[in-house]
Image (cartoon, grey):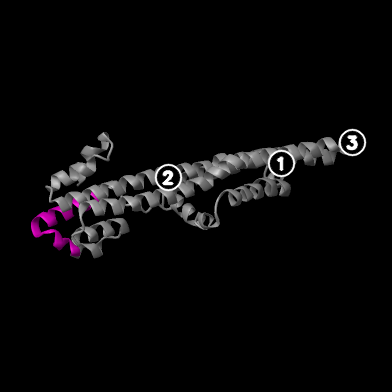
Amino acid sequence: MDIASLIGTLFGLAILLFVGFETSHGHFSMFYSQEGVLMVFGGSISVVFMAMPMEKLKCVPGFLRRFMFHKATPPAEVIALLRNLSEKSRRDGLLALEAEIAKIKDGFLVQALKMAVDGTSPETIETTLRMEVLAMQERHRAGKKFFDLIKLYGPGWGLVGTLVGQIGMFGNLGGGDVGAMGKMLAIAVVCTMYGTILANAIAGPIGDKLSLRSGEEIINREMMLQGILSIQYGDNPRMTVDKMLAFIPAPQRAKLKAAA
């Protein structure tokens, strides 16, 4: 579970409910508009179907899981694991690492280690794994794109709903029906609210978190790649660790080096 995502979600929801309760005195139904829901949420869904292929849309549940559940291996664990593999390789030989493959859960690292143990050339290992990283980036980019589209077009559909509500209100001016005009005005305002919440409280934060997680995972993959290549070259374990630490911001290096 990503604690930060959970805290942010619950905190934002609590603020929204508290302010809504104080404003409506518990009558939350005044914030609901069937027309607004259809216009903003239905319109936003139509946009993503128009803009993205179906195979990408089928991955949306996975994108949401990545937002709430972060399973990437922390950098400290990556460095410690590869340092241990490097020490074992220097002591017992590269083939001794074959027994360690079954203990590793990260598929990318397993693939890299298998290729190294099988005697694949460093150039081939690097080329193959970099293609894996590029494919992963493309998958992550599709996830962020989904939420970027909602962030971009959700408020636009909210504006459309606002304009429709205003037109309906003006259309009832001649009849003098205050109730009908009030309903149309409420639809106009609620559509704007729905679009704003959808973009700024849901789609925007999720897309930004996915982008950050993607960057972290790419760094992890690069660390693993450089670590495996260093092991295959027969580098000293300290040099292997130093190569991986090059991907870590300077203020964190001393702490990670000590932990490794």
Q: Is residue 183 left or right of residue 42?
A: right
Q: CA distance from mark 1 to mark 2?
A: 33 Å
Within 10 Å of disc 2 (Cα), the crowding (few <14, some 14-19, many 20+) is few
| Percent x, y of residue 192 | 67, 38
Q: Residue at x 46, y 41 (%)?
A: 208
Name the kind of residue labelled 1 in the image.
Gly
Circle 2 residue: 4
Which segment did they paint magenta?
78-98
Q: Earlier in the sequence, mark 2 or mark 3?
A: 2
Within 10 Å of disc 3 (Cα), the crowding (few <14, some 14-19, many 20+) is few
Circle 1 residue: 161
Q: CA distance from mark 2 to mark 3?
A: 51 Å
| Percent x, y of residue 15 | 56, 40
Circle 3 residue: 176
Secondary structure mainly formed by the magenta segment: helix
Name the kind of residue labelled 2 in the image.
Ala
| Residue 144 within the segment the image draws in magenta | no
Q: Is residue 9 left or right of residue 92?
A: right
